[in-house]
Amino acid sequence: MSDQVSAVADRSTIRLALVVGGLVLAVLLGFGLGRLNGGGTGGTATAGVSSSTGGHTHPPGTGVHDHGAVTSTDGQAGAEAGGLSVSSSGYTFAPLATEFPAGQPGQLRFQVRDAQSRPVTRFAVVHDKPMHLIVVRRDLTGYQHLHPTMAPDGTWSVPLTLAQPGVWRAYADFTAVADDGGQAAVTVGVDLVAPGGYQPRPLPKPATSTTVDGFTVSYQGSPQAGATVPLTFRVDGAGGVAALERYLGAYGHLVALREGDLGYLHVHPELELVDGQVKFWLTVPDPGRYRLYLDFQVGANVHTAEFTLTIP
């Protein structure tokens, strides 16, 4: 009889051990799958950048991609111009120096700081780069699209030449990755100074076609204040429509700056060419004059076509 009781107890002990072991195994498997699927923040904690938004695409017709504001819960950003202040969405553009001798090569060094004044070191890669820096003089001349590099302490640096005297505007266009993994697409701006006699140039008259480096660049579309409309750009070379190449992950990049306050609009194209042309969707927030800058690549060389646009 005692042997039977002992056998029953042994079987109960084995069943209990199997149940407990199964529960432990399930917990461990669940935790491991969660880590593999990005459930924790460890996936980007030690990296300076995250590629989770590498494509950074938006449905066509959804309006301007404005890095001046954090994207809303539906994934879209507002149509207001960005880059009007040195701080936005809890992030601050902090240059180490703001004065550069006109016409002389220099080095722009800066940090992006969070609400606690700590240097930010985690950025998502958007269009092949974690940081896009746009520099232009206040009369909207001298446009430059630069890509700084970041040191481990969060200090960015990039060679910079301010060709002419005057006040220049620098825009830091980036997507910061917070400690909890959340991402904020932001554009912040700061003034740079090249001492000397400033002689602003008037904007060229509005036109839908221009020439640059032997290419004729034209666009079709009629932007309106507060409305989302398509702009289609065609690039022609000596032999007809140019063979556009991907530059920073896209067939073209379009920046629009508003005359006066230099409000910044950054618009992304559709993923593929349309009959060999680059198609953008643009929302202009207010009437006024804007300067458009189209970056495109042909034969491994990047070119920039500029247009003046008047919105009544």
Image (tube, rainbow, N blue to C red):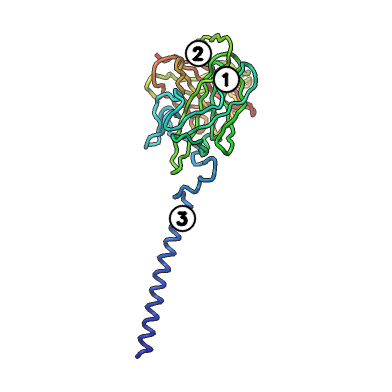
In the image, what residue occupies the spot 55% across and 10% down? 198
Image quadrant where residue 132 sits: top right
Q: As shown in the figure, which amino acid type bears the numbered disc 3?
A: Leu
In the image, what residue occupies the spot 53% across and 10% down? 200
In the image, what residue occupies the spot 38% across and 73% down? 16
Does 173 sit above or below residue 216? below
The residue tagged 1 is: 99
**Tag 3 or tag 2, which sits nearer the N-term?**
3
C-alpha separation, residue under disc 3 versus residue under disc 1: 52 Å
Is label 2 or label 3 in front? 3
Camera-side residue: 36 or 2? 2
**Tag 1 or tag 3, which sits nearer the N-term?**
3
Camera-side residue: 165 or 71? 165
Camera-side residue: 198 or 239? 198
Residue 274 appears in view: no
Q: Secondary structure at mark 2?
A: loop
Whether pointer 3 and pointer 1 mark residues with C-beta atoms closer than 8 Å, the reply is no
Q: Secondary structure at mark 3?
A: helix
Q: As shown in the figure, which amino acid type bears the numbered disc 2?
A: Ala
Tell me the quadrant of the picture where the N terminus can be found: bottom left
Q: As shown in the figure, which amino acid type bears the numbered disc 1?
A: Glu
Residue 311 in the image, given as x and y percentages of width and height:
41, 15
Label at residue 207:
2
Tell me the quadrant of the picture where the C terminus can be found: top left
Image quadrant where residue 81 sits: top left
The residue tagged 3 is: 33
Query: Dot 3, how many residues are within 10 Å of its Cα: few (below 14), some (14-19), or many (20+)?
Result: few
Residue 126 in the image, given as x and y percentages of width and height:
51, 35
C-alpha separation, residue under disc 2 versus residue under disc 1: 34 Å
